[in-house]
Amino acid sequence: MEFRPKKKRSAPSVIIVSLIDVLMVVLIFLVITTTFKERIPALDLSLPTSSQAGSSATETEKPLLVRIAKSEPHLQLNNKTVTLSELRDAFYQRANRKPTITLTIQADEKAPFGQVVSVRDLAQEAGITNIHAQVKLTDNR
C-alpha cells in the first residue's frame, strides 16, 4: 500500500567550486607550515660554541669543507670520506688552482684533536692560509 506518489529522484551532484576552495586553503596551509632544512650528511657532529665567531666572505669557487667526526672514519672532504694522504693531494690540487681558497673545518667537540691539527698542518703545507673553524654561536651574543 503506497500513499505517496513516486517522485523521480535526480542523481546527486557534487559542487566542485567549494571543493577547490577547500583544497586551496589546505595547500596554502601546507606550504606555509612546511620547514625547509639544509641537508646535513650522515655524520653526527656536535660543533663547539663561540660567541665571537664571525661570518666568512663568500667566494665564487666552492670552498673546501673538511668534517672531522669523533668516530672512524674521521675525515670527510666535501661530503666524501677521505684519508690523510687523499686530503693532502686535494689540498695541493686546489691550492695550485686557487691560492686564496677557503678551508672550513667542522670538527666534533669530541673528535681527536690530533686529527684537527693534522688537517690544519696539511692545509698550511699546501699553501692554504685562509682556514676557518666552524662553530655554533651561543645565544648570549
Image (cartoon, rainbow, N blue to C red):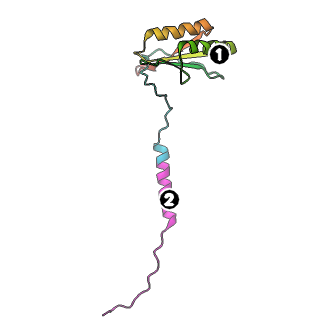
Residue at the image position 47 percent from the left and 47 percent from the top: 30
Q: Quadrant of residue 62?
A: top right
* Residue depicted at x 43% and y 22%: 45
User: 92 left or right of 118?
Assistant: right
Q: Looking at the figure, which quarter contains the C terminus?
A: top left
Residue sitting nearer the eye, 67 or 15: 67
Amino acid at pointer 2: Asp
Q: Secondary structure at mark 2?
A: helix
| CB within 8 Å, label 2 to label 1 | no
Q: Is residue 14 magenta?
A: yes
| Mark 1 crowd level (few <14, some 14–19, many ≥20, 10 Å Cα) | some
Q: Which residues are magenta?
A: 1-29
> How far across and how far down the image is residue 140, in percent?
40, 19
x then y, percent, for residue 97: 69, 15
Q: Which residue is mark 2?
A: 21
Write down the residue under mark 1.
94
| Along the viewing direction, whichever of 30 and 110 lies nearer the viewer | 110
Q: In this view of the protein, which residue sits in the foreground, 50 or 88?
A: 88
Q: How far, Cα to Cα, is label 2 from label 1?
A: 55 Å
Res. 103 visible in picture: yes
Q: Residues within 10 Å of mark 2 (few under 14, many from 20)?
A: few
Q: Nearer the viewer, mark 2 or mark 1?
A: 1
Residue 17 in the magenta stretch? The answer is yes
Mark found first going from the N terminus, 2 or 1? 2
Residue displayed at 46% across by 48% down: 29
- Indicate which disc residue 122 carries: none
